[in-house]
Amino acid sequence: MTRILGVDLGTERTGLAIGSFGVARPLIVVEARTEADIVAGIARHAHEQDAREIVFGLAISLAGTEGPAAVRQRGVAERLGRETGLPVRLWDERLTTAEAERSLATMDRRKRKEVVDMVAATLLLQSYLDAQKEREER
């Protein structure tokens, strides 16, 4: 069974999800602000979950361009790959946070803020897993 870790990098919180057998599920939110602490937290969870691959969200605008967030994400993803020795796949995270917020709309605002990044990571990872399955079926 190949386990894949999904990462939604935020400014204050980083959501993590774990996927196996084609299904992604929320894992945890890493609350860290420095790049070193973020990478260390993600690496620790990747190791604990016995992940064999990491899918890292990349913020691409609706126009298909990359801005400052994408530059930061690329840098953290590269550092994470060096730290873990695992393959890190950048994956378009377009609209995952907005979709996560919509799915949590009825939840208390404070609680929603605590889990939205984790839900976004789950949506990101599920889209990757679905694309992999579709590719295999062709």
Image (cartoon, grey):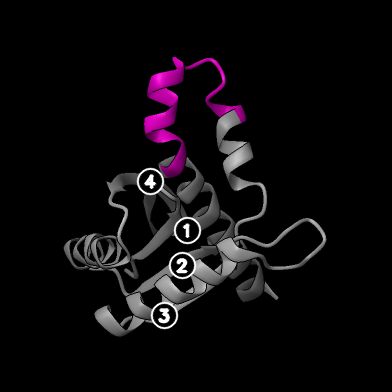
Instruction: Indicate the amino acid at tag 3.
Output: Glu
Q: Total marks drawn?
A: 4
* Mark 4 vs mark 2, CA separation in Å: 19 Å
- Identified by mark 1, the residue type is Gly
> Does the magenta stretch mainly form a helix, a strand or a loop?
helix
Instruction: Label 1: state its secondary structure.
Output: loop
- Circle 2 residue: 55
Measured along the vertical axis of the image, is residue 13 above or below residue 44? above
For the point 31% across and 46% down, the residue is 27
Q: Residue at x 54, y 48 (%)?
A: 123
Q: Which mark is residue 78?
A: 3
Q: Which residue is mark 1?
A: 22
User: How far apart are labels 4 and 1 at the CA level?
Assistant: 29 Å
User: Label 1 to label 2, Cα distance in Å?
Assistant: 13 Å
Q: Which residues are magenta?
A: 102-117
* Callout 2 amino acid: Val
